[in-house]
Image (tube, rainbow, N blue to C red):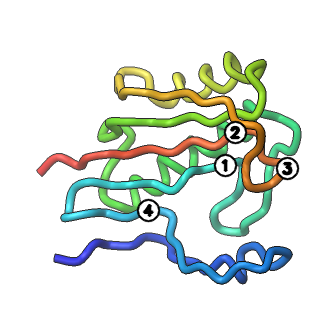
Amino acid sequence: MKHTRIRTFNTKKTYPEQNLDNDLCQAVVARGSTVFLRGQIGQNLDTSENVCIGDASGQAEQAMYNIDMLLKEAGGELEDICKITIYITDPRYREEVYRVAGKWLKGVFPVSTGIVVSALARPEWLVEIDATAVIPD
């Protein structure tokens, strides 16, 4: 069985200001039950519009909304998340971002890793959250 790729895109169209030509997707469902999600940021997946510029909690809210939507498209739900990784560009964002993630994941109890990075792929992005889920048989 081949892996299912959800919301495929090419970086040439998504990021026209960059000289990239990579075929990517937002999620991969591997072997029918494990879902690997691309790191989600404060960006509307339907329009590629960046939202909540300068607002870490707003970007985290959009990222979690995207994660929820992608998992549903993959046939899963937030309760299927096993692991999340949260990247922030400033340690002062930690509390507000983790509050947002915690609200979305209340009762899920995934393992979590938090990382402070010097920057994300675009300067307006303050938060990136990725997740791995396993959809029960």
Q: Which residue is mark 2?
A: 127
Q: Which residue is mark 3?
A: 123
Q: CA distance from mark 4 to mark 1?
A: 14 Å
Instruction: Please determine whether, in this image, residue 118 is positioned above or below residue 122.
Output: above
Q: CA distance from mark 2 to mark 3?
A: 11 Å
Which badge, 3 or 4, comes first in the chain's sequence?
4
Amino acid under disc 1: Ile
Amino acid under disc 2: Val
Q: Which residue is mark 4?
A: 27
Q: How many marks?
A: 4
Q: Nearer the viewer, residue 107 or 95?
A: 95
Which badge, 4 or 1, comes first in the chain's sequence?
4
Q: Which residue is mark 1?
A: 41
Spot occupied by residue 125 in the image (x, y as percentages of width and height)? 78, 47
Circles 1 and 2: CB atoms closer than 8 Å: yes
Report helix, strand or loop for mark 2: strand
Q: Residues within 10 Å of mark 4 (few under 14, many from 20)?
A: many
Q: CA distance from mark 2 to mark 4?
A: 18 Å
Does 119 sit left or right of 129 as displayed? right
The residue most toward the front is 118
Report helix, strand or loop for mark 1: loop
